[in-house]
Structures are given as structure tokens and as C-alpha cells.
Image: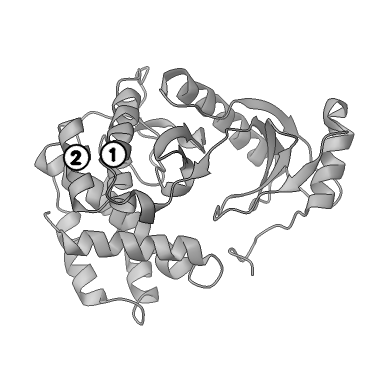
């Protein structure tokens, strides 16, 4: 089932032809589809150490190429300051064989996608996340500020999207309670000076080995934002005790912590209803995150 009304299709045969024709050095490598809960790209392994990422949405090839180039630059910048492994950009491919957009090739990082159920009480993983977030916050913004789109700027800017989410969730959640909570979240004090953030620290973008963080994926959004933005990981991953470990490790104040909770709320509200049928894993993440927030609301 398609996740998006304008979703593009690419199968392993198309991916194999495009990779083989455009990059002769990889034409003899096996190409295989990667099953993920991802919502932005279809991913294919190229041998043992590379992967191709095909955008699932987009109409203008030039705009998509510009976006992929910007993401590659951001990913390289993330890799320069992350204490954990990140994919390195390798190449950009061209449209062909019915696939209308450019696509990218990255290095493959070994590890398993984080499982919120097994890590919910892990103080060790909370410490790893604190190490990651602290390192990203310490990176140079080079005078840049939040770009003005998506999560990471002003909470009230998301009023329209939240209203859509509330309407779509009427038969799924206690929307009256959630509206009251959003009314409090949107009044939180501003964040202050932007810092560098990953921007999407959901479990699917964190790789684990033996219960410890070993890799960070999807760094194309790395950039300046509200310092609390990456705290969404606390609510996506951890129960109360491990969340407190993360908070203490980072030295988060009351309002910073609550803004992180608010950004997790914004993200989770969209995940639950939008992907309810097309991507049950993402929908379940939205539900579990909202449950954690509602169990411990301190705006």
C-alpha cells in the first residue's frame, strides 16, 4: 500500500539497471531491497558497503537534485562532528527506466535499527544519545539560523498542521485532551540561540549493536535549530527513568525539556493517523510516543 498519494515506484530490477548502467564499477555487485519503516526513500543494498536511496516523492528533477546535493553536504558535515558512524555520500544517479528523479548512493553502516521496546529502560543507550546530542550541539553553526521550514523553529507555526492532525485523529485518540495539551505546549518560552541538530532522531535513524549506539542515519537535515529538537528521541525511545538519565546527562532545564516534549508531540501526532494503514510501524511509533507524553506531561 502506498504511503503517499504521489508516491513513486521503484523495484529492485529498476534499481539494478540504473546502478549497473550509470556506475560501471558496481555493475557486478548484488543489489537487494532493504525493508524499512522509512517514508522518504526506497533503499537498496549495493554489495556489502554501499546503498542506493531513491526518493519516493518529487516532481521536478532539478529541485530534487538540488535537495540531494544539499543533503549530501549536510551529511558530510554531520559525519565530521558525530562521535558515531554516519553514511558518507558517494555519488548521485540520474533518472531512467521509468524512474523520473535523481537518486543517491551512500556508504552502508552496519547495525540494527533501534527497537524502542528493548531500549526503553536502557540507561546505557540514553548515555550514548546524550553523547551524540551534546557533540552535535557543540558543532559550529557558522552563523546560520533555522531555515524556517519543518520542526525546529517556532511551535505556534505548526498550529495549522496540528489542527489537521486533531481532525484526522478524532476516532483514534482523546483529541480534546490533546488539544488542551497543545494549547499549553505552544505557549512555552522561545528556545533562544539555535544549535546544530540532527533534526529527526527517531528510532529508525539510530543503529544499535549489543545494546549500544553505533550509527546515525538520515543526516541530510543536519542544521541549526531549536536546541530541544533532538530531545524528541527521549520520548520516542525511553520510559521515565531512562528519559531522566538523558535529561540529567545533558543538563536540560525545565523549558528546554518541555520543548523537546512538544516537538515529539508534533511529530507523533502526524505519524499516528497518516501512516495508520500504509506504514503500521511508523503509526505505532506515534502512538507509543504520545502515550509516554500523556503519562508524564510537565509543560
The mark found on residue 179 in the picture is none
Tell me: 228 left or right of 24.
left
Residue 45 against residue 98 in the figure, above or below: above
Cα separation between marks 2 and 1: 6 Å
Residue 219 at what x, y percent from top left?
Answer: 49, 34
For this orientation, the residue located farthest to the bottom is 171
Q: Earlier in the sequence, mark 2 or mark 1?
A: 1
Tell me: 183 left or right of 7.
left
The mark found on residue 126 in the picture is 1
Give the quarter of the image for residue 211: top left
Q: Tell me if I can see residue 69 in this picture.
A: yes
Residue 87 at what x, y percent from top left?
Answer: 57, 30
Residue 296 at what x, y percent from top left?
Answer: 15, 59
What residue does disc 2 label? 245
Residue nearest the observer in this picture, 114 or 56: 114
Task: Please give the name of the residue rendered at 50% of the width and 67% of the height, measured from the top-left corner.
Answer: 280
Crowdedness near tag 1: few (<14), some (14–19) or many (≥20) residues, C-alpha within 10 Å: many
Residue 298 against residue 170 in the figure, above or below: above
Residue 65 at what x, y percent from top left?
Answer: 67, 36
Amino acid at each position: 500500500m502506498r504511503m503517499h498519494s504521489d508516491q513513486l515506484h521503484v523495484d529492485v530490477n529498476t534499481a539494478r539497471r540504473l546502478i549497473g548502467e550509470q556506475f560501471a564499477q558496481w555493475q557486478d555487485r548484488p543489489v537487494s531491497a532493504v525493508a524499512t519503516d522509512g517514508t522518504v526513500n526506497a533503499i537498496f543494498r549495493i554489495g556489502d558497503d554501499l546503498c542506493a536511496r531513491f526518493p519516493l516523492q518529487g516532481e521536478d528533477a532539478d529541485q530534487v537534485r538540488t535537495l540531494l546535493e544539499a543533503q549530501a553536504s549536510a551529511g558530510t558535515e554531520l559525519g565530521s562532528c558525530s562521535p558515531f558512524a554516519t553514511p558518507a555520500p558517494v555519488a548521485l544517479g540520474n533518472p531512467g527506466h521509468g524512474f523520473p528523479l535523481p537518486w543517491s548512493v551512500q556508504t552502508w553502516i552496519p547495525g540494527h535499527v533501534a527497537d524502542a521496546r528493548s531500549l526503553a529502560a536502557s540507561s546505557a543507550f540514553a548515555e550514548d544519545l546524550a553523547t551524540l546530542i551534546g557533540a552535535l550541539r557543540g558543532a559550529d553553526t557558522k552563523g546560520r539560523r533555522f531555515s524556517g521550514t519543518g520542526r525546529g523553529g517556532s511551535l505556534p507555526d505548526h498550529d495549522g498542521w496540528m489542527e489537521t492532525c486533531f481532525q484526522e485523529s478524532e476516532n483514534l485518540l482523546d483529541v480534546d485532551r490533546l488539544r488542551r495539551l497543545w494549547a499549553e505546549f505552544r505557549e512555552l518560552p522561545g528556545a533562544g540561540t539555535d544549535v546544530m541538530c540532527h533534526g529527526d532522531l527517531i528510532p529508525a535513524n539510530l543503529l544499535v549493536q549489543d545494546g549500544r549506539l553505533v550509527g546515525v542515519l538520515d543526516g541530510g537535515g543536519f542544521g541549526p535549530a531549536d536546541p530541544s529538537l533532538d530531545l524528541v528521541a527521549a520520548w520516542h525511545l525511553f520510559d521515565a527513568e531512562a528519559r531522566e538519565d538523558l535529561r540529567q546527562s545533558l543538563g536540560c532545564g525545565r523549558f528546554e525539556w518541555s520543548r523537546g516534549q512538544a516537538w515529539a508531540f508534533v511529530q507523533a501526532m502526524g505519524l499516528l493517523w497518516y501512516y495508520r494503514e500504509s506504514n503500521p510501524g511508523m503509526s505505532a511509533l506515534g502512538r507509543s510516543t504520545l502515550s509516554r507524553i500523556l503519562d508524564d506531561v510537565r509543560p
